[in-house]
C-alpha cells in the first residue's frame, strides 16, 4: 500500500475531475464496505459534501479501524480527491468516538491535509449499529434525512468507504489497481488479526494464515455477524470482503443463516406475540420510512394481505438484521420475512411508490442499539479484541470472481495458460456501471470457468 505525502493530501485543484474518475475506473475500484458499486460512477456527480465512511459498525470487525490507524493519510487523500471529482466543498471522515486511537490518527491526517480546518473535519460517531448504513451516517453527520428509496445524492452527499478512498489515492497517485484489501480474520482461530489479502485468496488459505482452528466443525462467515454470509473453504476473498469469522457450526450466528423462509413462516404463525419490538429498533423506520416489520409479521402469520403498506414496506428493508437479532424476544426472523416478501414483490413486477420526504422519529438517537449490547446478544462478547495488522498474505493460488460487485460483469480479456503479472487487466468493463478486474498475483492462468479466473503463482502450491 502506497503512502500519500503531505503535499499530495493538501487540498488543491491540481487534479481534474475527469482524470480522477478515469484513474479510478482503470483501477477497478468498487465500494469496499460491502456494496460493491463502481466508485468511478459514484464520483460522477456534483455534491456539496463527501463523507468517508469509517464507522465499521459490525461487531468484531477491525479492518477499517486498522486502515485509518496505519494509513490515514491515504484515506484523507482519497477523500480530497473525491471532493475534487464531485466539486464538494466539505469533507468528513466518520469514525467512532469509542476508539480514541483511531480518532487521533484521523484528526492528525485531517490537520495535515487542511491545517485551517475550513474544508475537512472528523465526524465522531456513536458506537451504535448500524452506524455505517448510509442513511444513518448522513443523518448523524449532516442532519439530513434521505427519503425512501433515495440515495445520498438526493441530499447533495457522496458516501464512500475508507478502504475505497485509500484505493482511490493509490489509483490516482500511483496508477495502482485494486488487487488486495484488509480483512479481519477472527473468531475461533489461533492468530486473529488484520491481514492484507490479495483478492481471490481462498478462505481456507486465509484460515491457515491465521494459525488454523481447533474446531472440529468450523463454519465460515464472510463479512460481519449481522450481514455476513455463510461460505465454504473453497470460496475466495473479493473486493468487498471485510471480514472472515470462524465459528462453531452450531453457533447461533451460523444456525440463523440456515433457517429457510417456510420454516420461519411456520414459527411466526406459532410464536409471534405482536409486541412490535422489531419495528421499534428498525433503523429505517426510525428515520421515518414506512417499513413495519411487526405488521408484516402479523400479516404473514395470519395469512392476511390487507395491510398493503406493511407488505410494500418490505421493499425498504436494508437487511441489517436488528429486528431479528435484537428486537424479537421470541427468536423469530422478521428480516427473513422482509427479504422473502421483497423477493416475491420484485418477481411480480411490483413498483414501490416512495414518499419524497421523510421525518425521523424524535427518539431515533436514543433508540439506536449500542454495539456492546448487540455483541452480547449474539453471544460474541468473548471474541472482542483490539486486533493488530499482521501482514500481507502471499498465496500460491487465487480464484478471482469475475463479478466483484454491483452492475454488469466485466468482459474477460485473458486466456487459460497465459502468464500474467500482478496488476494486469483480466477483465474490462462492459458498460458504465461495471468495474475492471486485475490479477492479484503474478503467475499462470490455469482455469477460466464458473465465473472465476484461477491463477497459480510460479512455484506456488495448489
Image: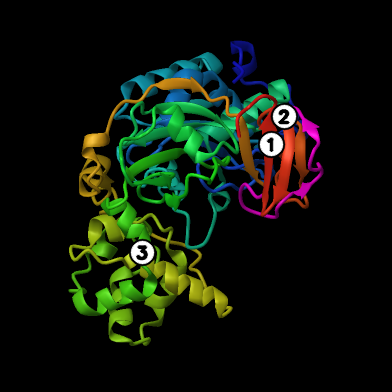
Name the residue beneath numbered marker 2. Answer: 443
- Given residues 270 and 40, the one toward you in this image is 270
- Image quadrant containing the C terminus: top right
Q: Earlier in the sequence, mark 3 or mark 1?
A: 3
Task: Please provide percent x and percent y for residue 40.
Answer: 69, 41
Residue situated in front as seen by the camera: 19 or 58: 58
User: Residue 165's x, y, as percent?
Assistant: 58, 32
Q: Pointers 2 and 1 in contact (CB under 8 A)?
A: yes
Q: How many marks?
A: 3
Q: 73 left or right of 305?
A: right
Q: Image quarter for residue 192?
A: top left
Q: Position of residue 206 (x, y in %)?
A: 48, 33
Q: Position of residue 122 (x, y in %)?
A: 43, 27
User: Per the image, is 407 magenta?
Assistant: yes
Residue at the image point whose x is 64% and y is 32% from the top: 179
Indicate whether 153 appears above or below 111: below
Quarter of the image that includes the N terminus: top right
For the question of whether residue 180 can be seen, the reply is yes
- Residue 455 numbered tag: 1
Q: Which residues are magenta?
A: 402-421
Whether residue 17 is in magenta: the answer is no
Amino acid at each position: 500500500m502506497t503512502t500519500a505525502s503531505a503535499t499530495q493530501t493538501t487540498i488543491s485543484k491540481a487534479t481534474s475531475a475527469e482524470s480522477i474518475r478515469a484513474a479510478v475506473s482503470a483501477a477497478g475500484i468498487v465500494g469496499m464496505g460491502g456494496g460493491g458499486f463502481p466508485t468511478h460512477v459514484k464520483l460522477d456527480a456534483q455534491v456539496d459534501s463527501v463523507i468517508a465512511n469509517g464507522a465499521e459498525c459490525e461487531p468484531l470487525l477491525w479492518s477499517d479501524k486498522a486502515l485509518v490507524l496505519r494509513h490515514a493519510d491515504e484515506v484523507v487523500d482519497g477523500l480530497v480527491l473525491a471532493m475534487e471529482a464531485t466539486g464538494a466543498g466539505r469533507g468528513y471522515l466518520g469514525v467512532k468516538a469509542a476508539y480514541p486511537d483511531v480518532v487521533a490518527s484521523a484528526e492528525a491526517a485531517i490537520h495535515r491535509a487542511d491545517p485551517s480546518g475550513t474544508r475537512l473535519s472528523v465526524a465522531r460517531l456513536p458506537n451504535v449499529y448500524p452506524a455505517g448504513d448510509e442513511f444513518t451516517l448522513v443523518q448523524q453527520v449532516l442532519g439530513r434525512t434521505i427519503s425512501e428509496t433515495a440515495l445520498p445524492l438526493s441530499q447533495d452527499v457522496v458516501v464512500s468507504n475508507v478502504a475505497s478512498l485509500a484505493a482511490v489515492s493509490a489509483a490516482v497517485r500511483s496508477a495502482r489497481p485494486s488487487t488486495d484489501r484488509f480483512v479481519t480474520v477472527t473468531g475461533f482461530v489461533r492468530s486473529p488479526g488484520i491481514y492484507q489479502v490479495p483478492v481471490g485468496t481462498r478462505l481456507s488459505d486465509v484460515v491457515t494464515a491465521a494459525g488454523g482452528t481447533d474446531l472440529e466443525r468450523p463454519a465460515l462467515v464472510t463479512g460481519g455477524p449481522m450481514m455476513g454470509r455463510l461460505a465454504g473453504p473453497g470460496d475466495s476473498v473479493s473486493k468487498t470482503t471485510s471480514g472472515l469469522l470462524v465459528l462453531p457450526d452450531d453457533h447461533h450466528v451460523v444456525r440463523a443463516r440456515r433457517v429457510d423462509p417456510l420454516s420461519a413462516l411456520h414459527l411466526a404463525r406459532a410464536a409471534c406475540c405482536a409486541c412490535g419490538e422489531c419495528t421499534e429498533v428498525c433503523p429505517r423506520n426510525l428515520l421515518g420510512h414506512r417499513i413495519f416489520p411487526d405488521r408484516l409479521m402479523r400479516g404473514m402469520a395470519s395469512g392476511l394481505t390487507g395491510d398493503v403498506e406493511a407488505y410494500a414496506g418490505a421493499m425498504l428493508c436494508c437487511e441489517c438484521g436488528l429486528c431479528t437479532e435484537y428486537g424479537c424476544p421470541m427468536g423469530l426472523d422478521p428480516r427473513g420475512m422482509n427479504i422473502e416478501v421483497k423477493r416475491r414483490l420484485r418477481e411480480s413486477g411490483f413498483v414501490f411508490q416512495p414518499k419524497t420526504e421523510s421525518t425521523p422519529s424524535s427518539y431515533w438517537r436514543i433508540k439506536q442499539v449500542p454495539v456492546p449490547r448487540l455483541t452480547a446478544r449474539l453471544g460474541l462478547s468473548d471474541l472482542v479484541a483490539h486486533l493488530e495488522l499482521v501482514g500481507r498474505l502471499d498465496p500460491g493460488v487465487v480464484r478471482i470472481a469475475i463479478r466483484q460487485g454491483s452492475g454488469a460483469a466485466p468482459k474477460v480479456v485473458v486466456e487459460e495458460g497465459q502468464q500474467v503479472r500482478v496488476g494486469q487487466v483480466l477483465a474490462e468493463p462492459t458498460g458504465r456501471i461495471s468495474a475492471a478486474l486485475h490479477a492479484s498475483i503474478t503467475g499462470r492462468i490455469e482455469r477460466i470457468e464458473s465465473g472465476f479466473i484461477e491463477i497459480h503463482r510460479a512455484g506456488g502450491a495448489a
